Image (cartoon, rainbow, N blue to C red):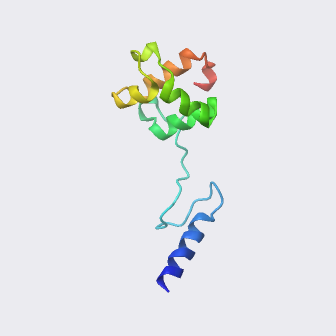
């Protein structure tokens, strides 16, 4: 019986439409606050927001490849992943990516 309840709760949790705030106390409650935007300062950009921006700009697969393989001179000869692991801020890494790929200022 408990297994059936667990399965039905999981189904209920995963069936909420994207962007709909889930009830308080549910395991997968989504925030109504976006992870990035003009109201969020560079110093507070989270790694997930950074990865989302990379995926929006380059596509998910290419963004992952760039993060793993492309070496940036502005990051001291590191890849995106290496720079983040070595303590660079997401702001510094995003600025290096934008500069290297000439991303327009309105999308930075």
Q: Can you say whether 19 is above or below 55 in the image? A: below
User: Can I make out residue 87 in this image?
Assistant: yes
Residue extending farthest to the right is 17
In the picture, measured across the screen, residue 60 lies left or right of residue 74, that is: right
Q: Position of residue 77 (x, y in %)?
A: 41, 16
Q: Can you say whether 16 is above or below 76 in the image? A: below
Q: Where is residue 11 in the image (x, y as percent from the top left)?
A: 59, 70
Residue extending farthest to the left is 86
Which one is nearer the viewer's eye here, 85 or 50? Answer: 85
Place residue 99 in its image quadrant: top right
Q: Where is residue 10 in the image (x, y as percent from the top left)?
A: 54, 69
Q: What is the total number of numbered labels drawn onto the structure image?
A: 0
Q: Residue at x 50, y 76 (%)?
A: 6
Place residue 64 in its image quadrant: top right
Q: Can you say whether 93 is above or below 19 in the image? A: above
In the picture, measured across the screen, residue 4 lies left or right of residue 86, that is: right
| Image quadrant occupied by the C terminus | top right
User: Can I make out residue 89 in this image?
Assistant: no
Q: Where is residue 59 in the image (x, y as percent from the top left)?
A: 64, 34
Which one is nearer the viewer's eye here, 25 or 83? Answer: 83
Residue extending farthest to the bottom is 1
Which one is nearer the viewer's eye here, 43 or 74? Answer: 74
Q: Residue at x 53, y 67 (%)?
A: 23
Which one is nearer the viewer's eye here, 99 or 68? Answer: 68
In the picture, measured across the screen, residue 61 lies left or right of residue 26, that is: right
Q: Which residue is drawn at 49% across and 41% down?
A: 48
Q: Residue at x 64, y 55 (%)?
A: 18
């Amino acid at each position: 019986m408990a297994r059936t309840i667990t399965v039905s709760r999981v189904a209920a949790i995963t069936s909420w439409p994207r962007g709909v705030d889930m009830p308080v106390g549910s395991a997968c409650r989504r925030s109504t606050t976006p992870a990035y935007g003009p109201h969020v300062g560079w110093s507070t950009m989270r790694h997930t927001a950074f990865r989302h921006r990379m995926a929006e700009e380059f596509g998910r697969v290419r963004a992952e490849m760039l993060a793993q393989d492309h070496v940036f001179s502005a990051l001291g000869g590191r890849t995106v992943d290496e720079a983040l692991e070595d303590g660079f801020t997401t702001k510094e890494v995003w600025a290096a990516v934008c500069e290297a790929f000439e991303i327009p200022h309105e999308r930075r």
